Image: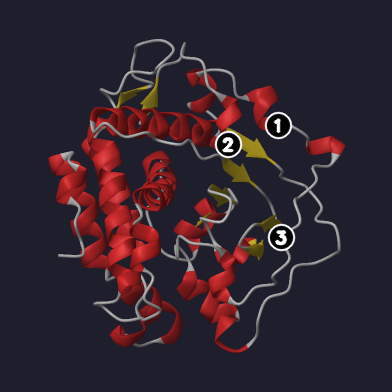
Amino acid sequence: MQFDDDAGLDTSEVRDVRGSRIPGGRATVGGGLVGVVGLLLALFLGVGPDQLGLSSGGDEARPDASSLAQVQQSCRTGRDANTRDDCRTVAVVNSVQDYWTQEFRRRDGVYTAAPTVLFSDRVGTACGTATSAVGPFYCPGDRRVYLDLGFFDELRTKFGATGGPFAQAYVVAHEYGHHVQDLTGVLKRSQDGRTGADSGSVRTELQADCYAGVWAHHATTTPDESTGRPLITSLTAADIEDGLDAAAAVGDDRIQERFQGRVTPETWTHGSAQQRRQWFDQGYRTGDMGRCDTFR
């Protein structure tokens, strides 16, 4: 994946609170199944930590002076995005939101932008206080995506994904898929409280995978609204395979086999590795969000 070296990045879409402190002390994580294994199985839940039994406090993180505005200072152009993980995240957020803004407009709708919050260790949200162990998530309460960049290393070391820049882009695009679901009303309607292969949770996650694929289909042709040129200039077959591999690595069956030694489909919340690859590929091949109806 390659970005236009000369393109400017819009850092207003990313809030950098790495190294921040939350007033009131540490976040608390529920015990029992919402312990180490439970948190691993909950990765990529895609919605706020309130559903994981985390603390209910949602105080805003306050950046330390030493880490204030790292992204705003360092991520200026596509050239920066080609060399730094945090700047790459800014560029992907810009590209994803440019695409959905134009797609909603094409459908006579209005896309409301959602910021991404980069954090480390723990963060306060409208959905509760979360630690990095929760993984990337979207909080519908404040319409923000939350991401600790350390997760990209865990994607390779703990979950066996091949990694790569586009695997990281898939993570971001998946979470913005949940934002699209929030804007269209699907997210609220699909939360039936059940688990299992046919649950609303699984269908919601698979649709977000499909939406990530739809964005990928258009990533090299969607013009940046300020320059008129695509921010992403190149996506190779190897890049797409990295995205497919990342989707499969966080399939429920893969995670359960790795961390509990057996597969229990009745507890699935995200879908199998095969399903996640299939729906990302569906979105990528068609480029049509209308082909992402996982609820039919």
Whichever of labels 1 and 3 marks the residue nearer the N terminus, that label is 3
The x and y percentages for residue 113 are 48, 35
Q: Distance between the residues labelled 1 and 3?
A: 23 Å
The x and y percentages for residue 198 are 24, 77
**Is residue 153 or residue 232 the one in the foreground?**
232
* Residue ID for mark 3: 58
Q: Which amino acid does label 2 sit on?
A: Asp
Mark linked to residue 70: 1
Q: What residue type is labelled 3?
A: Gly
Cβ–Cβ below 8 Å for labels 1 and 2? yes
Residue ID at (51%, 73%) = 40
The x and y percentages for residue 242 are 31, 47
Label 2 crowding class (10 Å Cα cut-off): few <14, some 14-19, many 20+?
many
The x and y percentages for residue 209 are 30, 54
Quarter of the C terminus within the rendering:
bottom left
- On the image, which quarter does residue 52 sit in? bottom right
* Residue ID for mark 2: 86
Q: Distance between the residues labelled 3 and 2?
A: 24 Å
Q: Is mark 1 on a helix, strand or loop?
A: helix
Whether residue 245 can be seen here: no
Whichever of labels 3 and 2 marks the residue nearer the N terminus, that label is 3
Whether residue 216 can be seen here: yes
- On the image, which quarter does residue 129 sit in? bottom right
Q: Is residue 200 above or below residue 171?
A: below
Whichever of labels 1 and 2 marks the residue nearer the N terminus, that label is 1
